[in-house]
């Protein structure tokens, strides 16, 4: 491991000042960053430890009813908060389906948004990777790429975003609060991550030294609480990243879908919001035919990037199942296997 400076500020302003140095990186729980440092994938010249900034640990409700979650709130603490799970059940289900219990107890929500891809070629410093070393090439293009992107990829990079948490956040119009030397700004979660294009080394819209201070879930997202699910297909039902995942939310009145939200994970370098599918569903009856049409719309631009053509029909079936599960109703309690499409916990028809 390379030598680095270590500083531990107690205010956001001091953290930003410390992180303005070239090669600086923010450190929260380090569940991803420290692994990358150990493997020499990243070599920060300075670590800015933000764990003593108390204002980043708060969960607050604004006057408009939006829920503001500080960037240092732990994943497990948020997911197990009873009022949060009641109001935003798909987000809680996504959190509980990610990593292991030990990692969820340590990991922070802000860090979750910024975790790096799990592409094996990114982690292997002997492999060519444009994300790690711009201009080096992409060994994943002709390598073991069965879990790589089918949407939004480019010849420069076919890696996927690994976050479960980000998928329902994108679906329900969450906002990220960012602060830097130029002041505070807000970015829609759906716009936080960038597609690779010709510059896959640029993964988010964050400028050097900027820090995520909070995530805001709009009050309007609570309208979907009765009919919201997150489903995830993975190679094993615990401690595995998504092959594909889907967050679905519906507002159902008099048997018709008044509003719909849908986003996919594991298919692109960012959580993939399916706006066209949402528009197609709105005003329709909740039935399999409509959900199949929505799945086709959501994946209309999908294209295999190697050995992962199976992901497209898999994602199509998962979308149909996620929408059907949401229509059936949010479970009265969290499934024993959160987000698993094979869970034995049935939905509860809240509107019955």
Image: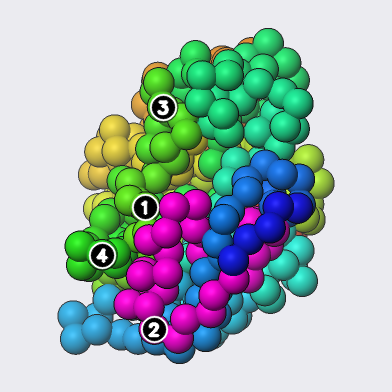
Q: For the point 60% across and 41% down, which residue is it?
A: 117
The Cα–Cα distance between marks 1 and 3, rounded to whole angstroms, is 16 Å
On screen, residue 170 versus residue 149, left or right, reads left
Mark 2 or mark 4, which has the lower sequence index?
Answer: 2
The Cα–Cα distance between marks 1 and 4, rounded to whole angstroms, is 9 Å
Q: Which residue corresponds to mark 4? A: 181
Q: Secondary structure at mark 1?
A: loop
Q: Which residue corresponds to mark 3? A: 199
Q: Nearer the viewer, mark 4 or mark 3?
A: 4
30 inside magenta stretch: yes
Q: Nearer the viewer, residue 292 or 84?
A: 84
The Cα–Cα distance between marks 2 and 4, rounded to whole angstroms, is 13 Å
Q: Are marks 2 and 4 in contact (CB under 8 Å)?
A: no
Mark 2 or mark 3, which has the lower sequence index?
Answer: 2
Q: What residue span does the magenta drawing correspond to?
A: 6-34
Q: Which residue corresponds to mark 1? A: 208
Q: Which mark is residue 228?
A: none
The Cα–Cα distance between marks 1 and 2, rounded to whole angstroms, is 18 Å
Q: Secondary structure at mark 2?
A: loop
- Crowd rating for badge 4 (residues with CA inside 10 Å; few <14, some 14–19, many 20+): some
């Amino acid at each position: 491991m390379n030598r680095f400076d270590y500083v531990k500020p107690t205010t956001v302003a001091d953290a930003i000042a410390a992180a303005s140095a070239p090669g600086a990186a923010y450190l929260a729980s380090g569940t991803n960053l420290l692994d990358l440092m150990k493997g020499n994938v990243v070599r920060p010249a300075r670590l800015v430890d933000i764990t003593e900034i108390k204002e980043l640990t708060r969960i607050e409700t604004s006057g408009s009813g939006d829920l503001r979650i500080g960037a240092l709130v732990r994943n497990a603490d948020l997911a197990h908060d009873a009022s949060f799970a009641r109001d935003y059940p798909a987000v809680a289900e996504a959190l509980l389906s990610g990593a292991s219990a030990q990692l969820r107890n340590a990991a922070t929500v802000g860090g979750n948004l910024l975790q790096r891809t799990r592409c094996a070629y990114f982690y292997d410093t002997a492999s060519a990777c444009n994300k790690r070393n711009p201009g080096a090439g992409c060994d994943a293009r002709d390598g073991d790429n069965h879990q790589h992107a089918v949407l939004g990829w480019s010849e420069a990079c076919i890696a996927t975003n690994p976050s479960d948490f980000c998928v329902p956040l994108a679906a329900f119009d969450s906002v990220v609060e960012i602060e830097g030397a130029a002041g505070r700004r807000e970015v829609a979660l759906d716009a936080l991550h960038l597609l690779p294009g010709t510059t896959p080394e640029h993964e988010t819209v964050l400028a050097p030294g900027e820090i995520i201070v909070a995530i805001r879930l709009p009050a309007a997202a609570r309208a979907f609480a009765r009919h919201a699910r997150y489903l995830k297909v993975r190679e094993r039902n615990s401690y595995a990243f998504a092959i594909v995942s889907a967050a679905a939310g519906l507002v159902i009145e008099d048997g018709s879908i008044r509003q719909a939200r849908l986003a996919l994970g594991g298919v692109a370098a960012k959580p993939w919001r399916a706006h066209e599918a949402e528009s197609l569903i709105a005003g329709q009856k909740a039935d399999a035919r409509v959900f199949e049409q929505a799945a086709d719309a959501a994946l209309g631009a999908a294209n295999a990037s190697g050995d992962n053509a199976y992901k497209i029909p898999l994602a199509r079936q998962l979308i149909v199942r996620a929408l059907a599960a949401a229509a059936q109703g949010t479970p009265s309690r969290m499934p024993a296997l959160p987000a698993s499409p094979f869970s034995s916990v049935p939905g509860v028809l809240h509107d019955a």
